[in-house]
Image: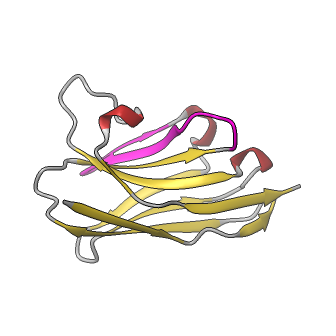
Amino acid sequence: QVQLVESGGDSVQAGGSLRLSCAISGDTSGTNYMAWFHQAPGKEREGVAAIRGVSTYYTASVKGRFTISQDNAKNTVYLQMNLLKPEDTAMYYCAAGRLRITGWPLSASSYTYWGQGTQVTVSS
């Protein structure tokens, strides 16, 4: 089992920045990808960014603004979010999973373990 706890969500104005953290505990030997997803009210959960080693993946709407990183010594994954927009407002979830070669890193169905989420609200 893997436990994930997100933190860092807040209310900010457009153009601002936030850094989300995901603390990882438990047996991660069965996972090879970490990712961040977001879900706005009434919408499906959407992949934002994923990481495996030095490889990173981003959805088009956040490229150039968000950066995913992982500190293995601290067992933590981060999502640095810059130039935030009102449309970034959502609950943000951390996820861990073991993807096959054909798996897509930004698909929710690829992930087994999920955190409880942290709320990000961006006002205009």
Q: Residue at the bottom extreme?
A: 74
Percent of width and height locating residue 3? 29, 65
The picture quadrant where one finds residue 84 is bottom right
Q: How is the image coloured?
A: secondary structure
The picture quadrant where one finds residue 124 is bottom right
Q: Is residue 55 magenta?
A: yes
* Residue visible at 41% across and 36% down in the picture: 108
Q: Is residue 46 magenta?
A: yes
Start-end of magenta stretch:
41-58
Percent of width and height locating residue 115? 41, 59
Quarter placement of the N terminus: bottom left
Main secondary structure of the magenta stretch: strand
Q: Is residue 15 left or right of residue 1?
A: right
* Residue visible at 18% across and 27% down in the picture: 101
Q: Is residue 10 left or right of residue 15?
A: left
Vertical side of 81 occupied by 72: above or below: below
Percent of width and height locating residue 69? 39, 59
The one of 83 and 99 positioned closer to us in this rendering: 99
Percent of width and height locating residue 13? 82, 64
